[in-house]
Amino acid sequence: MNVRITAQDPLRLPCDWLLVGIADGDVPEMFDNALGGLLRELVERGEFDPNGREVTVVHPRGAIPARRLLVVPMGRERTAEAVRRAVALGGRKAKRLGGGHVVIAPLQEIADADAASAYAQAVAEGLFVGTYEFESFRRKQEGRGGPLTDVDLLVAQEDQVAGAETGLAWGRAVAEGVNLARTLVNEPANVATPARLAGVAEEIASAAGHIRCRVLDEKAAAQEGMGAFLGVARGSDNPPAFIVLEHRLDEFPDTKPVVLVGKAITFDSGGYNIKPSQGLWKMKSDMSGGAAVLGTFDALARLEVSLPVVGLVPAAENLVSGHAYRPGDILHSLSGQTIEIQNTDAEGRLILADALAYAERYGPRALVDMATLTGAMMVALGYSLTGYFCNDDDLAAQLEAAAERAGEPIWRMPLWDEYDAYLESKVADMRNVGIRWGGAITAALFLRRFVGSYPWAHLDIAGTAFADSDRKPPPPLTPYGATGVPVRTLMEWLRALAA
Ligand code: BES
Ligand code: MN
Ligand code: ZN
């Protein structure tokens, strides 16, 4: 897709599709006049709902050079999120109906260069995230539409072009990181193995001068003393990989790095505490946290973010075999603490425990971990909200602001000290599960036992990482499958830290 930014007049540009936004009570006069009042009529007759989710195709029949209009709903306010949604909806519609050359008329008033940048970023995210399709395992089918070949992103004035170019470059790089994460999650577990994730990490690093990658194999992880991580990995014939990514560490030898940790269980059968068969296939998405870390580094590879960042991705598969760990086993974690396994399905916290202990050597400025950690979080908050826990109010405020800008809602949950008692074991330093009630909280409290004295947040993305067909309404940018959460939030946060 070739995207240009210009200040041309949309009423004079020939194209296959002209995308025009209508907000509640705000029909754009210029287009309405050019079409003899048609747009106003559509709204007044209730044939187009500015607050809805449907795109209307209009044929101007020569009234303007565009072959067809895509009239997209902008909702009540022309916010960044409204722009992302409108472009995603319109882009998908154009693609489904044959694709080609799309012109995006200005969807928002733009006050200055910063606003122009934010606007173009939102358009780029809507366009690239919104039109993504996971098609690599399907033979090409006839009649399934066509690609968007050229896109003209129009701004109202010439002096907005430079700002918009900045936002476009950023938004596109972030969207590509998001889509990489989505592809890794959508790929089945027979493809997206720990070795594949390690290979992707190495590719990201080798294509960028400012990122290094190191992968600890089983032997190296054993030498480190990662007994919790390796305990989980033992049951699978797919060897584990502990992935370490380092972004601009040499450039900032005196600055503490931000550390990102992502759970990557490439398939979670539950182990001997085996899961029910209903929906089990979805456990191919249990590496979404790790995929988000890789997606974030993919975006960092394409961008200029002046900040040292470390990514840690423990990758393993949780299966059943003659080598698998059992309920009752006691594991020696990298931190030195021992863990009694009372449920082999509470494996995510075990691999994270060793990653958190490994992070200690970097002396983190702040650490954010992300994981499809508990069904309990899905019960609590459903599909649309990521529940997060945080030991520091400043970090919490930063993350909420970043998530708000990104349009990836997060909701704070309590690190309720009292419940730590549920993690007591009769035979080891702790056990790996609490009781059923408050399961997302006890999981977070388990992780806290491996966190040092730095600001830390834990994002439980069990509900938000993968949009199944029963999610309503389907997420506007990612209607089905992997969402790439929380790559956009992390990128907003890192950008703010680097500023
Ligand atoms: N990967 C699952 C959590 C999960 C469930 C993610 C549903 C996405 C959708 C995790 O490893 C798990 O099995 N957690 C257990 C913990 C329990 C044994 C304490 C759970 O939530 O049931
Ligand atoms: Mn599990
Ligand atoms: Zn899991």
Image (cartoon, grey):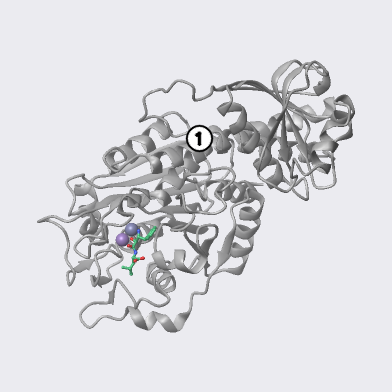
Would residue 464 be found to the left or right of residue 125 on screen?
Answer: left
Q: Nearer the viewer, residue 82 or 90?
A: 90
**SS at mark 1?**
helix
x, y percent for residue 86: 68, 39
- On the question of residue 9 being in view, the answer is no
Q: Residue at x 41, y 49 (%)?
A: 288
In this orientation, which residue lies closer to the viewer: 147 or 302? 147
- The residue beneath circle 1 is 301
Q: Amino acid at mark 1?
A: Ala
Residue 191 appears left or right of 449: left
Horizontal arrangement in the rendering, residue 97 relative to residue 115 (left or right)? left
Q: Position of residue 492 (x, y in %)?
A: 61, 48
Q: Is residue 27 left or right of residue 81?
A: right
Is there any visible trace of residue 289 in the rendered image? yes
Label 1: how many Cα within 10 Å (few below 14, some 14–19, many 20+): many
Residue at the front extreme, as displayed: 45
Image position of 104 with respect to 411: above or below: above
Q: Quadrant of ligand 1?
A: bottom left
Query: Percent from the top left, x then y, of residue 361?
Result: 39, 57
Q: Position of residue 26 (x, y in %)?
A: 85, 43
Q: Is residue 334 above or below residue 216?
A: below
> Is 93 situated above or below 480?
above
